[in-house]
Image (cartoon, rainbow, N blue to C red):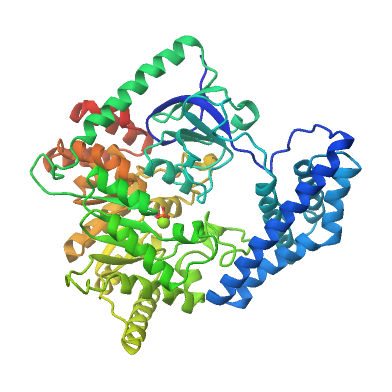
């Protein structure tokens, strides 16, 4: 039977029932209300407005206190929309006069405004449309009567089908585990994909027509090895995939048994297999799979999932919780990396033509020095020695999206300032290693100038690849270009790793390629010994590492340098890996 093709973003096989996440931006079913239902629908709309206003007032107060009045003003603007008689009148008229559900009426109002605003080039007016969409999303979450994931209509493992899975959405739905994910947008290193991988959930992105075709309760197969999806498969296909799924689960169980073994190459060299985490649950997962440290804690998830904005004390508490849950080893806290595909309304709300090239990450943090300092202070405070045992947590501080030498100097200045403040206030803290992410080509090229200024380096290959190839990491249309195994990317990676090794500065790769068998073998050949990946990949990479020697991987790397395309490299590596470690075939993907 014919498969739908997407992009493989998290390996493995899942067979289950579709759970389609409702999307306000997709037209709701147009069933007209009975006259008797309109009063109830009006009440539901009013109730949703009241709840949304309450939430927004709370958000305003907290953001004003911690970030500033100016940034908080957005929430008052949203309240004003919810109180605007013209906006509310339009929605009400849709319900009363045209007998639409509140959801359908909201959808129509949004379309009307979108049509009006699309005719203008005025940036201010375009901004208002973004606000309106935010407000409508908030209202729709209160109005939603979507089928709940625990509905008896959905028995069996759930496969989430959505336009995209937002970073703020948990990957469990109520009490139900998510067995697989299919999205119509997104790419290999989109943050939704990273979330799926961190939980070991098979996922395929970029299946463009899936939302039009899948219905709740449909049988669906996700083949995360090669990005195939089968909707309502025939009997033979379903059976074959059930068998593969059992093999996949058995392989994972077999690999999980290596959790207490050290990570050693076949030459007997020790490797650091660290985990990338977003929260306490991931830190626990990292410990459970035997990771020996945390190479990347994406602290922005704390901000993305917090109901308002966490202050210094709340951050400190959150970092302590993550530390307590983490494996015994270094814990690398990366400061806020907002912008690109992750936005927080009080920090990154301006619409930009090129968000990944724009106001992102430390570029935003620099403009809010007090807010930024509160994060640096919280990290330093979390590093204070334990007052009873005197033990000092092994925290490292990592800064994302560094482009220039001046930025590094400025970051160091801010860390110094935070230390001075804490000294003056008599608050205990610990000194921490200072690290930078190499993910902007300019920084990779000037690695020799940056190295003397930093204690360690972490290569963010997800961004480095998208910037080197000028191909958006989230856009399925350019996924064929956004390839970590393309010759120019490999050359830059090799140069940076060599420079760090010569300067004796610890270097880790923490992009998704660190957890992909084919890239792992090449990075090993380049001299990398520290890898940070989604926890679910640690057992697989430990198994793979135990089959790698410098001699064999160097030979592979020499051959790879003779190829001109990533397709040739991919094919060659697939063959080599199936010889080196045939048992991992089920978990390997392009
Ligand atoms: C990267 O860019 O490779 C990285 C690890 O950071 P993020 O995926 O969070 O942008
Ligand atoms: Mg990055």
Q: Is residue 5 above or below residue 97?
A: above
Residue 335 locus on image (x, y percent)? 40, 66
Name, please, the residue furthest toward the top: 236
Which residue lies at the image location 28% right of the left edge and 27% below the top edge? 585
- Total marks in image: 0
Which residue lies at the image location 15% right of the left edge and 38% below the top edge? 548
Name, please, the residue furthest toward the bottom: 424
Which residue lies at the image location 58% right of the left edge and 77% below the top edge? 68
Question: Can the viewer see residue 393?
Answer: yes
Quarter, ligand 2: bottom left
Residue 468 locus on image (x, y percent)? 42, 53
Q: As drawn, is 140 to the left or to the right of 270?
A: right
Q: Nearer the viewer, residue 121 or 531?
A: 531
Question: Can the viewer see residue 491?
Answer: no
Name, please, the residue furthest toward the right: 97
Name, please, the residue furthest toward the left: 268
Residue 6 locus on image (x, y percent)? 50, 32
Q: As drawn, is 363 to the left or to the right of 423?
A: right
Which of the 4 quarters of the picture holds residue 378? bottom left
Residue 391 locus on image (x, y percent)? 18, 69
Which of the 4 quarters of the picture holds residue 248? top left
Q: As drawn, is 413 to the left or to the right of 149?
A: left
Q: Is residue 307 above or below residue 484?
A: below
Which of the 4 quarters of the picture holds residue 525? top left
Which image quarter is the C terminus in? top left
Which residue lies at the image location 61% right of the left edge and 72% below the top edge? 61
């Amino acid at each position: 039977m014919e498969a739908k093709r997407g992009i493989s973003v998290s390996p493995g096989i899942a067979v289950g029932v579709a759970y389609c996440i409702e999307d306000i931006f997709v037209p709701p079913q147009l069933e007209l209300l009975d006259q008797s239902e309109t009063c109830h629908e009006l009440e539901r709309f009013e109730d949703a407005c009241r709840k949304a206003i309450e939430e927004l007032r709370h958000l305003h107060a907290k953001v004003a206190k911690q970030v500033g009045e100016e940034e908080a003003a957005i929430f008052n603007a949203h309240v004003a929309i919810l109180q605007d008689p013209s906006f509310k009148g339009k929605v009400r008229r849709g319900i009363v006069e045209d007998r639409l559900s509140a959801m359908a009426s909201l959808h129509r109002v949004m379309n009307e405004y979108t049509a009006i605003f699309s005719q203008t080039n005025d940036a201010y007016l375009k901004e208002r449309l973004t606000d309106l969409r935010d407000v409508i999303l908030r209202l729709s979450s209160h109005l939603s009567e979507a089928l709940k994931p625990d509905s008896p209509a959905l028995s069996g493992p759930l496969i989430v089908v959505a336009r995209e899975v937002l970073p703020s959405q948990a990957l469990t739905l109520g009490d139900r585990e998510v067995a697989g994910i299919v999205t119509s947008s997104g790419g290999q290193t989109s943050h939704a994909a990273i979330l799926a991988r961190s939980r070991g959930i098979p996922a395929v992105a970029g299946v463009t027509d899936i939302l039009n075709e899948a219905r709740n309760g449909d049988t669906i197969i996700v083949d995360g090895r090669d990005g195939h999806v089968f909707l309502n498969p025939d009997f033979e296909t379903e059976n074959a995939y059930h068998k593969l799924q059992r093999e996949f689960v058995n392989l994972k169980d077999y690999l999980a048994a290596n959790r207490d073994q050290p990570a050693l190459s076949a030459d007997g060299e020790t490797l650091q297999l660290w985990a990338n985490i977003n929260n306490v649950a991931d830190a626990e997962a990292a410990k459970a799979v035997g990771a020996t440290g945390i190479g990347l804690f994406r602290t922005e998830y704390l901000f993305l999932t917090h109901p308002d904005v966490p202050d210094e004390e709340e951050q400190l508490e959150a970092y302590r919780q993550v530390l307590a849950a983490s494996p015994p080893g270094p814990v690398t806290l990366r400061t806020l990396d907002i912008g690109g595909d992750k936005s927080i309304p009080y920090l990154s709300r301006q619409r930009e033509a090129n968000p990944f090239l724009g106001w992102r990450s430390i570029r935003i943090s620099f403009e809010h020095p007090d807010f930024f300092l509160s994060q640096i202070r919280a990290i330093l405070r979390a590093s204070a020695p334990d007052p009873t045992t005197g033990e000092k947590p092994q925290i490292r501080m990592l800064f994302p999206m560094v482009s220039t030498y001046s930025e590094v100097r400025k970051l160091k200045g801010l860390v110094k300032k935070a230390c001075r403040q804490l000294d003056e206030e008599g608050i205990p803290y610990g000194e921490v290693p200072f690290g930078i992410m190499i993910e902007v080509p300019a920084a990779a090229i000037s690695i020799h100038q940056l190295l003397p200024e930093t204690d360690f380096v972490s290569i963010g290959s997800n961004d480095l690849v998208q910037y080197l190839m000028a191909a958006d990491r989230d856009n399925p249309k350019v996924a064929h270009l956004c390839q970590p195994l393309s010759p120019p990317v490999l050359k830059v990676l090799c140069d940076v790793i060599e420079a760090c090794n010569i300067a004796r500065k610890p270097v880790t790769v923490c992009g998704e390629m660190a957890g992909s068998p084919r890239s792992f073998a090449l990075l090993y050949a380049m001299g990398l010994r520290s890898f940070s990946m989604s926890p679910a990949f640690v057992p697989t990479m430990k198994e793979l590492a135990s089959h790698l020697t410098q001699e064999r991987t160097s030979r592979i790397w020499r051959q790879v340098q003779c190829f001109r395309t990533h397709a040739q490299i991919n094919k060659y590596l697939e063959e080599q890996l199936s010889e080196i470690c045939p048992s991992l075939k089920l978990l390997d993907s392009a």
